[in-house]
Structure formats: structure tokens, C-alpha cells
Image: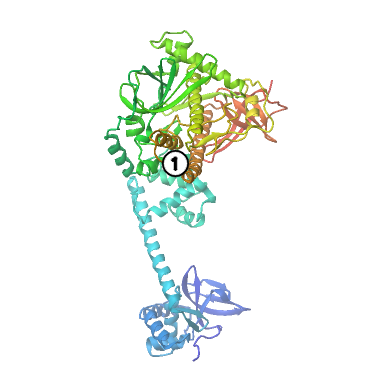
Amino acid sequence: MSSTSTQPTPGGVALIAVSGSLLPVWIEAMEGSKLRTLSEDGTCRVVGPARLYWSSQSRLVGTSELGAWFDALQEKARGVELSVYWEALTEEGTQEVEVADLAHLAFGERGPSACDAVVISLFGTSTYFKMKGGTLSVRSREAVERASREAEAERAAGEARSWTRSAIDRALELGEPIGRGDERVEPYLEALETIALEGKAAPNFKETMAWLKELVPGAGEPEVRARGLLVRLGVYAPDENLHVRRAGVPREFPDAVLRAAEERAGETIDTNRRLDLRHLTTLAIDDERTTEVDDAFALDGERLVVLIADAASWIPKDGPLDQEAARRATTVYLPEGKIPMLPERLGEASASLNAGVDRPALAFSFEIDAEGRVRGFEVAEALCRVDERLTYAQVDEALTGRSASPHQQALEWVSERMLAHRERRTLSGALHLQRREVDLQIGADGALLVEPVDANGPGRTLVSEMMVAACAGVAQWCVDQDVAVIYRSQASPDSPPEPSVTLDDPASVVAVLRTLKPTQQGLRPGRHFTLGVDGYCQVTSPLRRYLDLINHRQLKASLRRRAPAHTNSDLNALVAASEEATGRARRAMSDTRRSWLLRYMSEHPGRRWRATVIRSLGRRWLAEIDELAFQVPFVPSGWVNPGQTVRLEVRKLDLDMDQVRIEEAPRG
């Protein structure tokens, strides 16, 4: 068998590859290993061997005949059935075949036009044959099946790209949101989102950018262009929180979870085995905007009863609600609103300790004397009813004498005992590192409202100390009762901090914080250095923290003399998964807070912000803007020291790219 392919010579014709297509050319001259060619329109191209696809034996008068010659060959090539010839050759056991022989199978002849038509039919596909010169390798059956699958996948992908492009064009033209859920569209929208969130670090960046540039021509950073398109398509809101998206925090609950919440909320909780505490005057103290009420308290003679919402009674283990709570791990608080761990039907209604309604709870009761000593700690399943919800501001006014409360005596008694408990912890080494705090929320006009928070106010101190006492008491109770729960501990620092820390000095507070070791969660009880307690088990926020809910299940199983709800290996796995999810949630909250504060600063151009220098970052320093409790790196204009007051100016701020440069204002 001999090939009908010839060496290219001046005056001959050839097929070259140009931008993924075949182009017929006239060979004008040889220039070493390269060819100088002319196409029908007179364009001259000098091409190397890699672009020469086929040198034909056909003879033409000149370039004017190229178009008609090529059109005739393309028409003839449509009759070539490569799969049929491949099947016949495979059955014969043939592994190689010349182009001329394949032409004979196709057309019953080996002439130039037959060979040219076969070669044209082979261009762009190697499913059945692989061509090298005039010789074709017959691919194995396994290779053909694999190539067929790949070709089908590419065909489907091409159709999806075309359909998606049409859908996007239609949505943009009509100004309507693009439909979600179509399996043809979703991969492209997901790729767009990846560009919007990760920029050039996104997987398949080049492929996605190729068609993004077609949709959004012009200049600009990739992530900004992708975000803009997603907004126009209705996938993103104009003020979309990219930090939440980037962290993978789910905003919406699946329908199955919402249905489960509705069904569960309509059920009646068994109260037969519960300690009925509805006769006790029960108070809940919280922020005025709080909607998930986890905790309340009551006095029962000389005993303080801390009541915590019994979320475990509403969330069946391993059900849709439990799985979704585990996935979220925590409620996420943002200036624009919260993303709850539990559906509102439960977290803000049926399971929440709302005033005036009967609610199941876990009761942690104990005696506490004037020196802050806790005795007789008990745990019970209870039924309670909150008589009144008080805000921190109302409690502050009552405890500072600015106004009287109907619950004045109870508030004063609990406050005195909690302050004594706090002092007792201080003597045990507790550190009260209260950093400056501000509350951020979005007003009705979309503007950021910044409100200072008195974290040392008597109301917040009362509640936080009561929660510490309850969690420390639960930890010891679990040790005594041999209940497997998740403890929180913190080892002592290598270099213990100074015994006294000024609460209004950010530099000193941060210096101490940098010496502390991270807290650990696990099944072994241990001392918590910062809190100054020998053991600590978080149980006070089961509507907002998944591991608190898990601890409730363990406590309830022990109280009912049943096997633990979760094995030790289960608990370890839950801790690992929860820490990963809460870590992402914290980053989303922190980054969101930073973005809103930078936006707030950008709305006050030219302003000089009073700040306290914290520490050196090398060429730059870290300072805390006093009014915003916001730590930022800045470039000093001269020598500075920790604790020094400086004035800062925003010199550059690009919110889209999250770029900021802050410098110290000129002194003097």
C-alpha cells in the first residue's frame, strides 16, 4: 500500500490549519522547511510543518480555483462514514492503513480527490483513526469507546454553552433574573461565582474568562466583571455579601428542613418527667433585638436557677433539622441581619424562651453565697414560663439607681452574688480582658449605624457571670456523674500576663491576648486559664451553637438513665466538623464587619480618625480606631509607641478589590 500524499512543491496545493479550520492554499515557494503560501483572497502566509495538514496531488491552474476545489471536496467528504470503515478494518485485525486504501473503501478509487475528501473527513476528529502523514493508525475498540464518550461529552458541553449563552443574553436583554436549577446553566453560573469570589486563583480561570469576556467586553478586574454580570443576572444582589458566599455559609434552609421545623413545632413536648418551675418569677435579660432567647433565670428560695432552652427536645437526632444545624454549627451575626442555625419556626418561636408561654428547659440550679461560692449544683429537665424580658439597658438603669424595677430585689441579689463570683474567679487567676465593642446594624436607609456597647455594664456582667457559673458547674457535675460531654479548656500561657490590665487600653489588652494559648474542645475536662475555672462545658446557647445542643443531649440521656446519645468517637467527629464550620462563620462575620467599617470610613472623606497605637507590624503599625473599635494597619509619619494616640487618614480605598491604605495624618 502506498500513500498518495506528496512532498509539498511550488505550484502544488495543500491544506493548512488556521484557527481550528482547514484552509486551501497555493504553494508559492519553499523557504527552508517552511512554505510560502497564497490563499484565494491573495493573503500570503509563511507556515511551518506543524501547520501543514495535507499536501494534495491535485493540480490546479492557480489560486482562483481553490474555493471551488475545496467546496467540491467538502461535499464529497460528507459521504465518508469513518465508523463503518473502522469496523470493517477492526474485524480484519488491520492496525494501520494508508489514506489511499481508506479512500478506496469509501469511493472505490485511490485518486487525489478521493484521498483529499477522506483527509478532510478526518480533520478535527481522532475517534477512529489517527493520521500521521499518509498513514492512519486504526484505533482499538477501547480507545474508540473512550473517544466516543469524550466526544459526546464535548458535544453536550457545547450545546450547554450555546444554550447558556442564549439564556444569559435573553435575561440581560429582558432585564430579568436568569432561571436557576437548569443543569445546563448551573455549571457556568458556579464558574462565574468562583471567579467573583476567588479571582485569578479560581479553578478553570482561563476557560471561564474566555466566555466571560464575550459576555462582558472591556477592561476591569475579573472578579469585578464577574460580580457585575451576576448582579445583572439576578444571581447576586447589588449589595451581595461576598464574605458569606466565600465562606460557604448557607442563607436559605432547604424545603425539607423547613417542613420538618413546621411539623416539629406543631407537636407537643412530653412534660410528665419535667420539674415544673412555672410558679417561679422568671426573667430573661438580653439585647432588645434578640429573637433567639436561649437563657433566663429565677430565684427559688436561696437557689439561683439558670434556665436554658431545651433545644434538644425539638431537634431529633440525625433528622433533617439536626443535619442542617450540624452543617451550620452556629448562628452568624452580621450588620445586615443574622443567619440562624435553626429555622425561625423553632429558634425564634417554639424552642425560644419567649415571655408568657410554657417552654421546656434544662434547669441548672445552685446555691451561691455572699463570697461567690457555688454549692449544691443540680441539673434537671424543667418546664418554665418567662414572666418578663428585660433589656440590658433596663437592668443597667435598675442596678445603677437611675430607675426602679418591679424585680429590683431579685436583680440586686443576683448582681451582688455574680460580682462576688467574678471576684472569686479573679482571685483564681481569671483575666477580664474586655475589649472595646461597638454594635453595627444597617438602618432603614441602608446606612451603617455604629453604637458603642458597654460590655462592662452591670446587666451584661450579671448575665455573662451567671453563664460562666452555670457552665463551670455543669462541667463539674459531668465529671462527678461520669457523663461524656464536650469540654472547653485553655492551657496556661508560657509567660503569664501582668496581674492587672487596664480595660480601656487596647494596646495592653492585645499584648495580653497575644500571650494566651488557644482554647481547646474535647472530651477531657481541663482548666480554663482565662476564665479561672477548673472545668467548663458550654450549654447556654443551644439555639445558636450546635455543640451546646449536643451537650444537652448527653445531659438528658444521663438524667433519664439512658445510654449516651452520642458515643465518644461521635463527639470527637462532631467537634472537628463544628470547629471547621464555625471557623468559616467567624471569618465571614469578621470580614463582613471589616468591609462595613471601611465603607463607613469611605463615607467620611478627609476625616482624621482618633486611634490608639497597638503594636508594630514591621514597616507598618497596628492601631485601633477608638470610635469604631476597629483595628487597622497604618503607615506612621514618625516614631510611635504602643498606647500612643494618633490621627489616621484613609488615603486609598477600593472596596471592590478590598484594598486600603491608611496613613497617620501630619502631626502638629
Q: Report whether residue 120 is seen.
A: no
Residue 258 is left or right of residue 89, and the answer is: left
Element under label 1? loop
The answer to whether 445 is drawn above or below residue 524 in the figure is: above
Other residues around mark 1 within 10 Å, as few (<14) / some (14–19) / many (≥20): some
In this rendered view, identify the residue nearer to me: 167 or 202. Answer: 202
Amino acid under label 1? Val
Q: Quadrant of the C terminus?
A: top right
Tally the marks.
Answer: 1
Residue 667 is left or right of residue 580, and the answer is: right
The answer to whether 287 is drawn above or below residue 174 in the figure is: above
- Looking at this view, name the residue that lies furthest to the bottom: 1
Q: Report whether residue 616 is seen.
A: yes
Residue 431 position, x and y percent, is 60, 24
Residue 603 is left or right of residue 360, and the answer is: right
According to the image, label 1 marks what residue? Answer: 249
In this rendered view, identify the residue nearer to me: 519 or 82. Answer: 519
Residue 367 position, x and y percent, is 47, 19
The answer to whether 269 is drawn above or below residue 180 in the figure is: above
**Which color scheme did the rendering employ for the protein?**
rainbow
Residue 93 position, x and y percent, is 44, 87
Residue 251 position, x and y percent, is 40, 40
Residue at image point 32% right, 34% down:
345
In this rendered view, identify the residue nearer to me: 368 or 437. Answer: 368
In this rendered view, identify the residue nearer to me: 75 or 267. Answer: 267
